[in-house]
Amino acid sequence: MSRTWLISAAAAAALLIGLGGAQAADKKLVVGFSQIGSESGWRAAETKTAKTEAEKRGIDLKISDAQQKQENQIKAVRSFVAQGVDAIFIAPVVATGWDSVLKEAKEAKIPVVLLDRQIETRDPGLYMTAVTSDTVLEGRVAGEWLAKQTGGTCNVVELQGTVGSSPAINRKKGFDEVVAKNPGMKIIRTQSGDFTRAKGKEVMESFIKAENGGKGICAVYAHNDDMAVGAIQAIKEAGLKPGKDILVVSIDGVPDIFKAMADGEANATVELTPNMAGPAFDALIAFKKDGKAPPKWIQTESALFTPDTAKAEYERRKDAY
Amino acid sequence: MIHRFLPLLVTSAVLVVGFLLCAAQFPNFASLRVVGNLLTDNAFLGITAVGMTFVILSGGIDLSVGAVIGFTTVLLAVLIEQGGWHPFSAFAVALAVAGGFGAAMGAVIHVFQMPPFIVTLAGMFVARGLGFVLSTDSIPINHPLYAELGDLALRFDGGGKLTLPALLMLGVVAAAVVCAHWTRFGANLYALGGNRQSAELMGVPVGRTTVAVYALSGLLAGLAGIVFSLYTGAGYSLAATGVELDTITAVVIGGTQLTGGYGYVIGTFIGVLIQGLIQTYITFDGSLSSWWTKIAIGVLLFVFILLQKGLLAVWTGRGGAPAEA
C-alpha cells in the first residue's frame, strides 16, 4: 500500500472522470421515467409505448422499473435528479409519500409529470401536470353506446372492479349517470368480479342462474375487459350467444377483447390508452420551447371501439402488449 | 494479520472500483449529491443490516425485520394521524413495541431451543399481518414535524446533503462498531456465534445475550421503520417487503460468516453501499431492466460465499482458526 500506488489510483480516477465529462456534449432531451413495474399486460404496453413515443421525438428515455416498491421509485427519482435529466415522469405505485422527493426535483428545477395515476400532496405545485384517463367518462361512453344500441331499454347486469378501487367507483358512476337519464334502462344485478377473468366468469354464472337462465338479461357491462372475457365464457357455457342474446360492453381495450369482437362475441370496448407518455412528451416539449405550463390535468382520449374495426385493431395491438 | 481483514478488504475494493467505473461512465456520478443519495436512500436498509449483523454474528438469523419495518410505519401513521399523538411519543412507542417484539422472539428461541429461522419466520408473518389489521391503505402522515424532520440536513455544495436518515444510519453504524469490538456484550456475541458450547462453559450468559441480540435487531428494525416513514411521509403495510433478504445479503457481502462468530459491522455498511451503488448505476443507465440489480447482487453474493469458503479452507489447512475479533 505504497504512496505511489495511491497517487496513481487517484490519477486514474481523475482521468476516468475526465473522460466521462467529455461525453456529455450532445443536446438531446433526457427524460427519466420511474415505472411501477410490469404487473399487467396494460402496464407493459404503457412502458413499450413510452419507448416508441420517445424514439419518435428523438428523446433519450431512461426507464427504471420499481418492481412494485415505492422506495425503489423514490431512489430512482433521486438518481434522475442527481443525473440532471430534463424531466421526470412518474407512474406512482401509491398515492402518498411523494412530497419530499418531489421537492428535491423542484429545487433542481426539473419538471415532473405524473402518468396514469394521481397523487395526494399538500402542494400541487410540486408537479407540472398529470396525464391520466377520465375514468368517469369511460363509464359514461360505455353507457351511452349501450343506450343508443338498445333504444334506451335494457336490463343490464354489472361486473364491478375491485371494491373500493378508484376505477371501479368511477366507471360505475359514469355508467349510472346514463342509466339515470334513460328510464327504460335498469341495472338489475351488480357485483364485484375483482377485475379478474376467473371472478368475472363466476359472477356471470350466478347472474345467469338468478335471471331465469339469462332470459331476463339484455346486456352485461364489465368494468374491465378481462371480466368481460370471463363473462363471455359463462354465457357460452349457459348455451346462449354472447354478443347477440346478451350484449357485452366493457372498458380497457386489451387485445383479447378485440379478438372476441372480431369473433362476434363482444360488442364494444372503451379504450384506456396505454399511450400516457406521448401527450406528456408533447406538453414537455412545448414547455421547454416557450415556457408555457400545460394544464394541471391532461385527459387522454376515451375512444369507443366496435366489432367493425376489431380485426385491424387486434393486429395493431397484439405486439404492443 | 492481513488475512483476517481480507474479506473486508475485498468488499471495500469492490465498492471503490465499482464507484470509479460508474463515475467513468456517467459524468454526474462522482458528486456529493450521489454520495448523499446513496446514504439517504439506503439508510433504513443500513440500520436494519446492523441489527442483522449482530444476530448473524451470534449464530442466528432474523427474518422478521422487513415486516417489523412495515408494521412500524403503519403504527406511526395510525398513532399520529388517527390518534393525534405527537410524533416523538409515537416514536417511543414504536421503538418499545419493535424492541419488545424482538425480545419475545429471542426468549422463545432460547427457552424452547427453537431454530431462529422458524421463530423469526413466524414473527415475520405476525408483524406483517398486524400491519394489515391496523390498515390496508397507505396513510399519509401530515404532521408538520414530519416535514421539518424531512428537510433537516447538512447541506454541501452541488446539491449534496446528509439528511437525518443518513446521519442516523452513520450514528448507528459507529455505535455498533464500538459495541461489537469494545464491550462485554460484543465479546459475548462473538463467543456465542463461534461456539455456543464453549461460550457457555466460559460463563457467557447465553440466554441474556440471545434475548438482547434479537431485542436489538427488533429495536433497530423499529428505528428503520421510523426512518422509512420519514422517507416516504406515509405508513403502508406493504412497505419494505423483502428487506430481510436484502439485509442478509449486505451482511454476507460485508464478509460476515452466516454460521456466526466472525465478521465486521463496517463490512455490512459497505455491503449496503454496494447494493445501493448497483441500483444507482442501473437507474443512471436507464436502459437496463432493474432486475439486473438482483442478478448482479446474486452473483456477488455467490462469489463472496465462495471466497469465505476458500479462505476458511486455507486457514484450517494452516492449522489456524479464523481469528476472533
Image: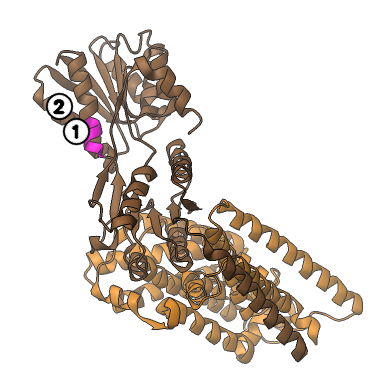
Chain colours: A brown, B orange
Q: Position of residue A14 (x, y in %)?
A: 64, 78
The answer to whether residue B261 is visible is no
Gap between marks 1 and 2 measured at Cα: 7 Å
Q: Position of residue B140 (x, y in %)?
A: 29, 62
Label the magenta part by its dominant secondary structure.
Answer: helix
Classify residue A78 as left or right of residue B313: left
Residue B243, placed above or below residue A236? below
The answer to whether residue B26 is visible is yes
Most extreme residue toward the right, as rendered? B318
Q: Position of residue B267 (x, y in %)?
A: 64, 77
Residue A166, placed above or below residue A84? above
Considering depth in this image, is B112 or A291 the residue closer to the camera?
A291
Q: Which residues are magenta?
A: A134-139
The amino acid on which the numbered mark 1 sits, given as a three-letter code, is: Gly
Residue drawn at (36%, 63%) of the image: A110
Q: Chain of mark 2?
A: A
Q: Quadrant of residue B315?
A: bottom right
Crowding at label 2, few (<14), some or many (≥20) Cα neighbours within 10 Å? many
Residue drawn at (22%, 21%) of the image: A145
SS assignment at label 1: helix
Determine whether label 1 and label 2 are within 8 Å by CB: yes
The residue that label 2 is drawn on is A178
SS assignment at label 2: helix
The amino acid on which the numbered mark 2 sits, given as a three-letter code, is: Val
Q: Residue B210 bears which disc, if any?
A: none
Q: Chain of mark 1?
A: A
Residue drawn at (8%, 19%) of the image: A183
Q: Quadrant of residue B68?
A: bottom left
- Residue A296 in the magenta stretch? The answer is no
The residue that label 1 is drawn on is A174
Classify residue A230 as left or right of residue B42: left
Residue drawn at (78%, 68%) of the image: B307
